[in-house]
Image (cartoon, rainbow, N blue to C red):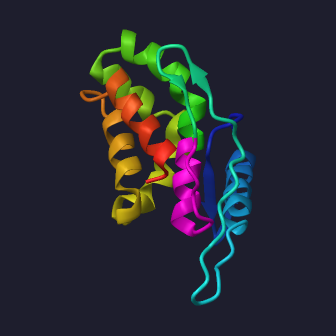
Amino acid sequence: MGAGKLRVLAGRGVVAVGAAALAGLAAACSHAASASTPAAGQTPGPATPTVSPSTVPVLGAMTYGTFPATKDGISALTLCEQWAGLRGQYVDHVRSDTPYQLEQWFSSALWHAAFSANSPLRVDPAYTGISTGFGLATTGEAASIHSARLLDKACAAAD
């Protein structure tokens, strides 16, 4: 098996999953497990960021809003954290790649965690700003510095 590639082998009811896949699953579970469900009538506390926001010369400093420690709140924070790690590369790609090349880059493993975190947000009205901003920023034809700034703004507002 190639290092870092997700491969699943199945045979006679046995499934083997690559080490990278297991590590990714474990990380996702530990991040999601940090969210406790509040009792009825209680408001969840804030989710704790695990990645410092980045500063990119063209985009400026990025900040995170206060995300609630709910399933979707943690997904929104995770998406913003993934974005924080990719925004420097994003500027370079937007400036030099064709829309087709951008779509290929957005389809790479680098973006998998961000797309996975965005999946539940598409139907949560509390996070339409983040989901819409992410959708614009990660569509080859719409990808731009302006779209990146919209996503930055949505992450700062935590909406």
Q: Is residue 6 above or below residue 101?
A: below
Q: Residue at x 45, y 52 (%)?
A: 118
Image quarter where the N terminus lies is top right
x and y, in percent, of residue 11 in the image: 63, 64
Q: Residue furthest left?
A: 141
Relative to the observer, which residue lies in front, 3 or 120? 120
* Point 54% across, 43% down: residue: 80
> In this rendering, would 9 be left or right of 130?
right
Residue 71 seen in the figure? yes
Q: Is residue 73 magenta?
A: yes
- Name the residue: 51% across, 54% down: 76
Vertical side of 71 occupied by 57: above or below: above
| Magenta stretch encompasses residue 122 | no
Horizontal arrangement in the rendering, residue 74 relative to residue 91 (left or right): right
Q: Position of residue 17 (x, y in %)?
A: 68, 55
Q: Quadrant of residue 41?
A: bottom right
Q: Is residue 114 left or right of residue 3?
A: left
Residue nearer the viewer, 135 or 22:
135
Write down the region rendered in magenta: 64-80
Residue at horizontal 57 percent and vertical 37 percent from the top = 63
Is residue 38 positioned above or below 66 on the image?
below
